Amino acid sequence: MSLLLDEVALATARLADAGVESPRADAELIAATVHHVRRGELHMVPDSAFDARFWDDIARRAAREPLQHIIGHAYFRYLDLDVGPGVFVPRPETEVMTGWAIARLCDMDVAEPVAADLGTGSGAIALAIAQEVPRARVHAVEADPLALAWAERNISRYGRSTPYMAHRVTLHAGDFRDALGELDGTVDLVVSNPPYIPVGARVPPEVGEYDPPAALWSGADGLDAVRAVERSARRLLRPGGLVAVEHGAQQGSAVYWLFPEESGWRDTRTNKDLAGRDRFVTAVWPAEMAG
């Protein structure tokens, strides 16, 4: 066994003792990043090339700093996004809702469907739509200056590396509650992963100590931002437009009733993530109620 693999084994034990959920995978990913190899190539790193910075990064992870902050990026669907302090790390759970949105946009008989990502954070949802629905135009809204900088960085990078995405995402600085007024009544799909944790709820250290508070907490029941998304969607959507909003695993029923027929919504549904947990609600804004 190589020196690096020996060190990875020791690091795995240290991360496990610290309460990290996936200690082996995290140790291997940190080792791969520090040594500029793929995770499956760790055995190829010669002993003489071992970099002691590995243990600095393991110490950070043992202190429960998010893995993505340490390695500097996060995967989301087919994207590799830059992330770090000041921006919410995109989660695998959100990929399912994003896939739903992408599928609906692909099915639309519209030359250039318009999507609005409310509270874009790193730009993950907006960029995934632009990448997988090349004819779509995406408007991404973010109020937090630090998160906005990360979104701009990711959008600019993909615009340079993937020419067809260069002008497909427009980033807007501001509160989504009153943003995009020029698009009122014209948007085909509104999608959002808003903050939805009740104030005072217990969360893992990676979340509570490192994710930006504005991306986490949302009132006593956690649904203040979801209510705001519902109001914004009513304003933005065209007749027959769609909305998708993420929520916590225990909030499915509560969020479902925030999109009632009395307000004009139709076909409201609770959708599950890959683990079978309630994860996002979708609804249709019908023609007779629009305007």
Image (cartoon, rainbow, N blue to C red):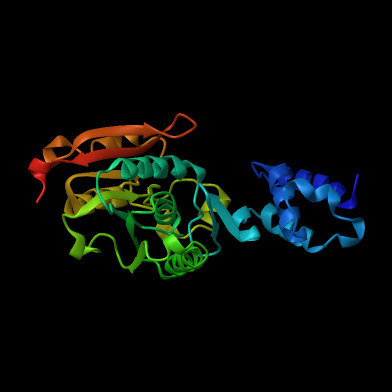
Q: Vertically, is 145 above or below 221?
A: below
Residue 159 vertical position relative to residue 125 in the rendered view, above or below: below
Residue 188 percent location from the top left of the image: 24, 49
The spot of residue 269 in percent (x, y) is 28, 32
| Of residues 254 and 291, the one drawn nearer to the viewer in this rendering | 291
Q: In which quarter of the image is the N terminus?
A: top right
Give whichever of 75, 162 is nearer the camera.
Answer: 162
Q: Residue at x 41, y 42 (%)?
A: 99
Work out whether 97 lies above or below 177: above
User: In the displayed structure, does residue 125 sit left or right of residue 68?
Assistant: left
- The answer to whether residue 258 of the structure is visible from this angle is no
Is residue 207 visible to us here? yes
- 261 displayed left or right of 195: left
Q: In which quarter of the image is residue 164?
A: bottom left
Residue 257: image quadrant is top left
Instruction: Say how many tags the image has.
Output: 0
Query: Where residue 189 sits in the image (x, y, percent)?
Result: 27, 48
Q: Residue furthest top?
A: 276
The part of the image, by quadrant, that contains residue 53 is bottom right
Q: Is residue 177 left or right of residue 162?
A: left
* Near-viewer residue (247 or 127): 127
The residue at the point 57 percent across, 51 percent down is: 205
Picture coordinates of residue 255 (x, y %)?
A: 29, 39
